[in-house]
Image: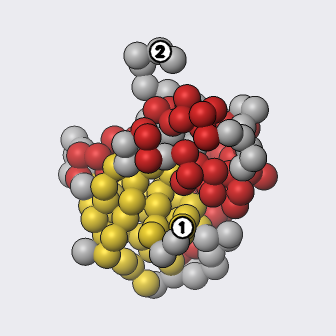
Amino acid sequence: MSDQPRYLEPGWFTRNVFNRLVRRLTLLGVSIWGSRVLRVRGRKSGEWRATPVNLLTVEGQRYLVAPRGDAQWVRNLRAAGSGELKLGRRSEPFAAEELSDDAKPSILREYLRRWKFEVGMFFEDLDANSPDERLAEVARGFPVFRIAAS
């Protein structure tokens, strides 16, 4: 794998139609398969930035996975260490801890089990039945954060 962080930029339809629609529905209180609006302070501007995300719960722990890689929200969350998740009028502040690569395979597996239909294109030939070794090989390209109420 390259030393450059992995990032797949969203296309026009995703940016201008899909993400906006999911964000609006989520802010109205309609969660689509666990969607939330992530709000985090920009690492340079300090202004709140918002993006729709899929909130994954595994064995009582909650996670945010970045299927596109080192996205802006990932960089901002790394810098801020906290943010908030919104669903309708409810806003939940949280603290975030980024997982090490060796802790990611089981989380990536569950993420694929839940959202393969939506994000499978970002994982190429991987799915929920991929061997741990294969998930470990690609873990570096998929940031994962454990979140807890703050």
- The image's mark for residue 139 is none
- The image's mark for residue 2 is 2
Residue plotted at (46% across, 67% down):
62
Residue plotted at (33% across, 70% down):
148
Q: Disc 1 residue type? A: Val
Residue plotted at (37% across, 48% down):
99
Coordinates of residue 139 in the picture (x, y in percent) = 51, 36
The tag earlier along the polypeptide, 1 or 2, is 2
Coordinates of residue 37 in the picture (x, y in percent) = 49, 65
Inter-mark Cα distance, 1 to 2: 30 Å
Coordinates of residue 27 in the picture (x, y in percent) = 53, 75
| 21, above or below 89, in the image | above
- The image's mark for residue 58 is 1
Q: Disc 2 residue type? A: Ser
| 80, above or below 23, in the image | above
The image quarter containing residue 10 is top right
In-image side of 98 versus 129 (left or right): left
Q: Residue furthest top?
A: 2
Circle 2 packing at 10 Å, graded few (<14), some (14-19), many (20+), is few
Residue plotted at (43% across, 84% down):
90
- Mark 1 vs mark 2: in front: 1
Coordinates of residue 75 in the picture (x, y in percent) = 34, 41
| 25, above or below 76, in the image | below
Q: For residue 59, say whether it is visible.
A: yes
102 or 143, which is in the foreground? Answer: 102
The kind of secondary structure element at disc 2 is: loop
56 or 137, which is in the foreground? Answer: 137
The kind of secondary structure element at disc 1 is: strand
Determine whether label 1 and label 2 are within 8 Å by CB: no
In-image side of 63 versus 115 (left or right): left
